[in-house]
Structure formats: structure tokens, C-alpha cells
Image (cartoon, helix red, strand yellow):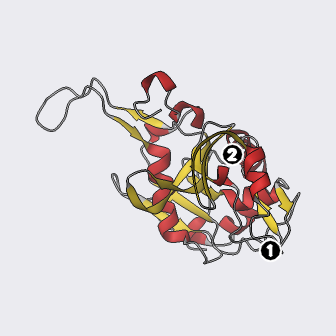
Amino acid sequence: MTVTPPPARGELRILPVHGIGEIAPRDDLAGIIADACNADPATTLTDGDVLVVTQKIVSKAEDRIEAIDTDDPRGHKAIVERESVRILRRRGDLIIAETSHGFVCANAGVDLSNIEAGYAALLPVDSDRSARRIRDAIRHRLGVEVAVIVSDTFGRPWRRGLTDVAIGCAGILPIADLRGSTDSLGRELQVTEVCIVDELAAAADLVCGKASGRPVALCRGIDPTWLGDGSVSDLIRHPSEDLFR
């Protein structure tokens, strides 16, 4: 068996994981991901790898799926209202809401795409916990230490287009705090904090795609100092620091 050599220093590889298949409620998601990764020598898991797992298959495995009335084009709006702790804006059928997790997003993350007609997918109750379960199960199954990011697609204020962001993580620091270090000209950085998990989630989406049936990507070659304990809640800006509330 040929094993892909590790990336050179400073090189980051992002590889799609093939063969995941359709996920059903209460499936062993971690086992399915582990088997799919190790079925291909290019994605055989090793210590320090980061798996980016799309929210939709996590929600399916955790049975965060609800039936809706297919005859009512607004049938899922009651679920959106229930999943919201605060409504920020309404425009037509679009609701911008804050979820119990602290995320501000369209329709409180309730999604009808890539799911059987007549059903809506809700966000996991605790996406950090979901990530930890996958990480811990893979460690138990394969004996390797990987990090896990649960990703979802969000829009952004003032910018067109969608991008994937992290809604849960385990085994990786959400933010690389560069404050106190120096830039290329020797000046001390005062405010620079890099959102590692969002950048990896967005990059992983480029190889997964929105309709390709590849809901998991493997990131290899990340800086080992990024690995550690953290929570996506660390990314939520406190209202006292938010200039737009």
C-alpha cells in the first residue's frame, strides 16, 4: 500500500474524503468517516490531521431532522421561529436570527437543501460536543489524534456570496492569537487574531462542493501549535464589543 508522504513544512493539503454515502439518523458517523478515510491511502488518518465535517450529515446522524408540510412553502418558518432566540431582520421570507448557540444567520440555520423533500435539517444542539464525539470515537477506533471541525454555510453582512464557517470544533484552537508578535517589518501586532477554524472550513468547502456528495474533507499539514482545546463559543463576540447591535 502506498501512503501519501506528509506535506512539506509550510504546505497545507486539503483532500476530499470519498465514499461517505447517505447518512441516516443514529448512524455511526465517526465509524463511517474513519472507514472512508482509511479506504484511500491518500486520506489514511494520521496524528495531527483535521477533519472538516459538514453540518448536514451531523444533523442527520443526530436525528435533527423534522418533517414539514410540502404543500406550504412557508412550512418550515415555524421551526425557524422556534430555533431563534432573537430575530434581527425580516425581509419577505428571509429571517436573520440569532440561535441559542449565539450564531447570527439566515433562518436560524434551518435548511432544506441536500435533504429529502418534506424535511428540514436543524443545527446540532451542541456542535462542539458533536465534534468531540467524532474525535473521541476515531481515537478509540484507530488510535490516532485528529481534530474535528463541524462546518456550515453562512452569508455575511455587506458581502455577496456564501462561505463555510465553523459551528463546532474539537482538538483545535478556534483562534490563533498573534497579538504581541511582530510583523515582517518588526512592528508589534496589536489586534491580529486569526480565525483558524473558519479559514479551514471555507477552504474545505472548495474541495467538498455544495452538491458533490462529499461532506467531509481532510486538512493535513496545519501548524501543530494550532492544536488544542477550544470551543466555537470563543468566536462569538460579546455584545459589549459589538458595534452593530
- Residue 24, image x, y percentages: 85, 66
Residue named by callout 2: 131
Q: Give whichever of 75, 221 is nearer the camera.
A: 75
Residue at the extreme bottom of the image, as rendered: 212
Instruction: Name the amino acid type tagged 1.
Output: Glu
**Is residue 3 visible in the rendered structure shown here?**
no
For image coordinates 43% across by 25% down, the residue present is: 241
- Residue 167, image x, y percentages: 60, 46
Q: Earlier in the sequence, mark 1 or mark 2?
A: 1
Q: Give whichever of 135, 197 is nearer the camera.
A: 197
| Cα gap from disc 1 to disc 2, whole angstroms | 24 Å
Asked if residue 205 is positioned above or below residue 123 in the image, the reply reads: below
Indicate left or right for 86 with 5 as reference: right
Residue at the extreme left of the image, as rendered: 185
For label 2, count other residues whose C-alpha is less than 10 Å away and answer few (under 14), some (14-19) or many (20+). many
Residue at disc 2, secondary structure: helix
| Mark sitting on residue 170 | none
- Residue 32, image x, y percentages: 77, 63
For image coordinates 85% across by 56% down, the residue present is: 63
Instruction: Name the amino acid type tagged 2.
Output: Ala
Specify the quadrant of the image occupied by residue 102.
top right
Residue at disc 1, secondary structure: loop
Asked if residue 172 is positioned above or below residue 182 in the image, the reply reads: below
Residue named by callout 1: 116
Of the 4 image quadrants, the one containing the N terminus is bottom right
Asked if residue 201 is positioned above or below residue 104 in the image, the reply reads: below
Q: Give whichever of 84, 172 is nearer the camera.
A: 84
For image coordinates 63% across by 61% down, the residue present is: 93
**Is residue 108 visible in the rendered structure shown here?**
yes
Indicate left or right for 130 with 235 as reference: right
Please name which of the two marks, 1 or 2, marks the residue nearer to the observer: 1
Indicate left or right for 6 with 208 as reference: left
